[in-house]
Image: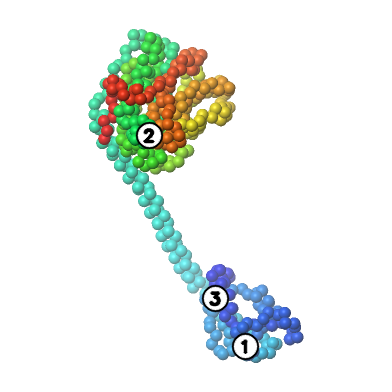
Amino acid sequence: MRRACRDCENLVVRERRKARKVCVPDAPGASSSAQPIAPDASPGLSVCSESERKADSADFDITLDDVQKRQPATAAGDVSDPVGTWHGPRTSDPSAQYTREPPEDPPDREERAEREAQVNRYLSTLAGEEEERGTVRGNRSVALTMARNKLFLAQVEEVAHRVFKDKLTPPEFKPKKPDAPVRRHVHILLSDLHFGSLLDPREVPHQYGHVEEARRFAAVIAQAADYKPQYREETDLHINLLGDIIQNQLHDPRDGAPLAQQWCAALHLLRQGIAYLAGQFSRVHVRATPGNHGRSISRHRERAINQKWDALETMLYHALRVACEPLTNVRFEIPLTPFFTYQSFGRSIFATHGDTVVMPGSPWKTINVANLERQINRINAALPDASEFGLFLLGHVHFGANLNLPNGANVITNGCLLPPDAFAVSNGALEVACGQTLWESVPGHVVGDYRYLRVGPEQDRDSVLDALIKPFPGM
């Protein structure tokens, strides 16, 4: 027999309180410690003994059907009860006993099953309505995100058709000795460029718009192209894109240029820079991984832990690869991992932005060498000694440094191209040594000649650099 639900039990309690019954001691001469008579009780009210009350409550088995079948008292001496009808004479004699009639026969099983089926159908309907409401709310959020992404892609497509309408025809590098062995690797580290920042000099120490960012980037490309030209026949170039290529709008939805404009400006500048370097080196290898400023905040509002590659900068890298397809001596590698690795004369190199995987410190603030060494030891501990990484490339901190750690590993952290922005100023960083990193590898030395390519206000005013890298014309 089904037990009554909690609501029905509460109803029974209320019904019993309404019944004007009182309890008296078992013996007429018992002390006055028995439960008091209710205030509204009268001397002529029928009563039950304490032992009967306890016995009745012990075997009081209430069912839903019994509650539904309860009937009000019809006779003057009757008291309504949810289980049965209790009868007793109106007398003050404590020995008077109540008698209980059995409840009416419960409905048959088919009727009960039908009622249960109706309840289940009703609950199923409610559950379906709630699920539909939740789906609508979720679909509305997804639809809004899809609409934003669609608008962004439409803006990118519109600007790309206008900006990249000219065919890419870089000067082709023709080595005097095409089959000359490779004896040198030149590596250039490009990260934290923050294209599209559009810094207002009324708010921050320096102006940094489309013209300034193009000239600083052109100065870096020019220095890389002029590096040891006498060894160009035997040198391969490795371009490492370590993220934060665009400014994005992480700290404020009005930060920098509109997002589509940032994206197109980055593609416009990188395309020219790689094309120019492809005319200076016989073989160019481009590897890329996104940074925290390159993430899609509709997918990763905070730090990108899962599928970091699902980012705006990954889209930028693939668009750049397509734009550089006419450059036959350029090869791209864009892995899905939040890092990439490669070899230089038998030494393994590990590269990541620096906001995940290997985290050197805080932008504009610190590089934690002790913590950095622990992280590197943990990565190399999982590898055979011969496969351990000898060089780690990191961005994010905006400090250019070449560290030789006690564990034998080299760490190169990259600087930034932009001057202090509003975020840096809010942290008290009013000046920074802007620049990018270049170094050379030869057999036996994964880091040989090292150079930090400094840029600053002097390059911002140098209009001659516009001939190398044309500034983004805007939307």
Question: What is the x, y in percent for residue 38?
Answer: 63, 82
Residue 275 against residue 2 in the figure, above or below: above
Occupied quadrant, residue 56: bottom right
Q: SS for tag 1?
A: loop
The residue at which mark 1 appears reads as 42
- Residue for point 30% across, 42% down: 151
- Residue for point 57% across, 82% down: 80
Which is more toward the observer, 236 or 42?
A: 42
- Residue for point 48% across, 15% down: 448
As measured in the structure, the alpha-carbon distance from the residue carrying label 1 to the one carrying label 2 is 89 Å
Which is more toward the observer, 96 or 420?
A: 420
Q: Nearer the viewer, mark 3 or mark 2?
A: 2
Amino acid marked by disc 3: Val
Q: Is residue 50 left or right of residue 85?
A: right
- Residue for point 39% across, 15% down: 227
Answer few, some or many: residues within 10 Å of disc 1's Cα (few below 14, many 20 plus, some between 14 and 19). some
Q: Is residue 274 visible?
A: no
Question: What is the x, y in percent for residue 26?
Answer: 72, 82
Mark positioned earlier in the residue sequence (1 or 3):
1
Question: What is the x, y in percent for residue 253?
Answer: 37, 42
Mark positioned earlier in the residue sequence (1 or 2):
1
The residue at which mark 2 appears reads as 204
Q: SS for tag 3?
A: helix
Occupied quadrant, residue 271: top left
Amino acid marked by disc 1: Ser
The residue at which mark 3 appears reads as 67
Mark positioned earlier in the residue sequence (3 or 2):
3
